[in-house]
Image: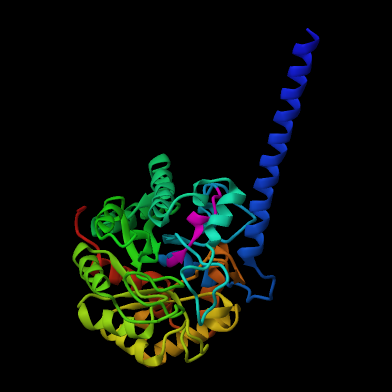
């Protein structure tokens, strides 16, 4: 009996230690995200009734959020990070692009990042004790895609996966009776998730991916990155990828591409592209942002530029900095090529999370934008491109 009591006591102590370790790991993960995805407390314009009414009567689309990487339950409203389904509803978002990063080199920068640098997501996987610490880019992408697919299957009255033009029309009709319904588009931040195998493009397309950024912070098998080592153009494999994406109705995201690769993409296709999250050199000059020449070329092809909300994109985080970048694009090519590209939950510090989006509508009105212009920027321009690019039926 004494031996059994000792064994039982040992088991209780061991279970307690494991529980405390798990709790510590969880709290460490939450603390890390608090540091990575922050909302800075700055003075913001008060949202008028006019701005609020205009915002919530518009169809709001955000082209870029990395929220599937966080590991949070997106059905629960959180005080951490920038996006979850409750905050999207509070911010009047009708359609959110969920863009999955699958490799993030640690130690790189805007000017020179090597794919061989240590992978930050492996470290996060160790902290969170999840599969990210041991699987490759393709599997990491699939895990993140499945999280949104599961949410849509679990709560179809709350989340709707959009993969076709018919889905988009159905979403807009359904929101007339159920404005709480949120559309979701799946995307990949970097074609390295395909692991240099174009068969994987078909696999991701089958699970619903409808936007792919060709590069992220480093050169890959498909193209050079604006922040990579060589910063080259499209590779032979990259040209095939771009052609197949256009054929399959997958939005081509040229964010993070090298200038040469941007020129080559725009020179070989006749469908509009998107820049899911960016700034412009005209207001914030760095290698991350678009030149005036590229703004004009993107607009000439009917594309949309998603203006970001963070410091690196617009050289500030106040709504006025975001609107200044929008103004620059509008001055160059008009207001039919501007959209929202928040980069929420993308290791960014912003002035407002998804629930605070009406403040951006107020800033646009304060800048003298007409209601029609605001509605185009909030989502109308992206809807136009989606209707032009997405397949009409599932492939």
208 falls in the magenta region: no
Residue 69 left/right relative to 232: right
State the image coordinates of residue 224 (x, y, percent, origin top left).
Answer: 37, 77
Foreground pick, 103 / 100: 103
As drawn, which residue projects farthest toward the right? 2
Foreground pick, 182 / 74: 74
State whether residue 368 appears in this view. no
- Splitting the image into 4 quarters, where does residue 264 fall? bottom left
| Residue at the spot 20% in from the left edge and 78% down from the top edge | 270
User: Magenta region: which residues?
Assistant: 62-72
State the image coordinates of residue 230 (x, y, percent, origin top left).
Answer: 40, 81
71 falls in the magenta region: yes
Where the N terminus falls, by quadrant?
Answer: top right
Residue 9 left/right relative to 257: right
Residue 216 left/right relative to 313: left
- Splitting the image into 4 quarters, where does residue 249 fall? bottom left
Report the colour scheme. Answer: rainbow
């Amino acid at each position: 009996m004494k031996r059994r009591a000792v064994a039982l006591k040992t088991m209780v102590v061991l279970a307690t230690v494991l529980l405390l370790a798990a709790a510590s790991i969880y709290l460490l993960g939450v603390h890390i995200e608090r540091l990575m995805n922050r909302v800075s407390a700055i003075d913001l314009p008060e949202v008028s009734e006019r701005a609020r009414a205009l915002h919530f009567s518009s169809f709001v689309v955000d082209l870029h959020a990395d929220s599937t990487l966080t590991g949070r339950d997106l059905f629960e409203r959180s005080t951490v990070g920038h996006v979850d389904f409750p905050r999207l509803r509070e911010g009047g978002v009708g359609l959110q692009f969920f863009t999955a990063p699958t490799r993030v080199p640690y130690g790189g920068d805007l000017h020179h990042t090597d794919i061989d640098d240590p992978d930050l997501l492996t470290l996060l996987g160790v902290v969170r004790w999840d599969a990210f610490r041991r699987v490759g880019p393709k599997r990491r992408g699939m895990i993140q895609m499945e999280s949104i697919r599961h949410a849509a299957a679990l709560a179809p009255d709350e989340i709707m996966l959009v993969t076709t033009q018919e889905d988009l029309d159905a979403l807009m009709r359904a929101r007339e009776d159920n404005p709480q319904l949120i559309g979701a588009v799946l995307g990949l931040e970097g074609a390295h998730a395909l692991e240099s195998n174009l068969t994987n493009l078909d696999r991701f397309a089958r699970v619903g991916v409808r936007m792919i950024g060709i590069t992220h912070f480093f050169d890959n098998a498909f193209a050079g990155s604006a922040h990579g080592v060589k910063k080259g153009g499209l590779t032979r494999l990259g040209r095939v990828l771009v052609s197949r994406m256009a054929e399959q109705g997958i939005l081509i995201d040229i964010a993070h591409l090298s200038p040469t690769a941007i020129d080559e993409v725009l020179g070989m296709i006749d469908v509009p592209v998107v820049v899911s999250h960016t700034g412009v050199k005209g207001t914030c000059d760095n290698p991350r942002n678009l030149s005036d020449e590229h703004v004009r070329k993107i607009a000439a092809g009917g594309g949309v530029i998603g203006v970001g909300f963070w410091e690196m994109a617009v050289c500030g985080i106040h709504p006025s900095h975001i609107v200044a970048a929008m103004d620059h694009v509008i001055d160059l090519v008009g207001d039919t090529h501007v959209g929202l590209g928040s980069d929420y939950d993308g290791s960014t510090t912003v002035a407002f999370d998804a629930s605070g989006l009406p403040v951006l509508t107020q800033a646009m009105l304060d800048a003298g934008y007409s209601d029609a212009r605001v509605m185009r920027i909030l989502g109308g321009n992206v809807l136009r491109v989606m209707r032009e690019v997405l397949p009409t039926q599932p492939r």
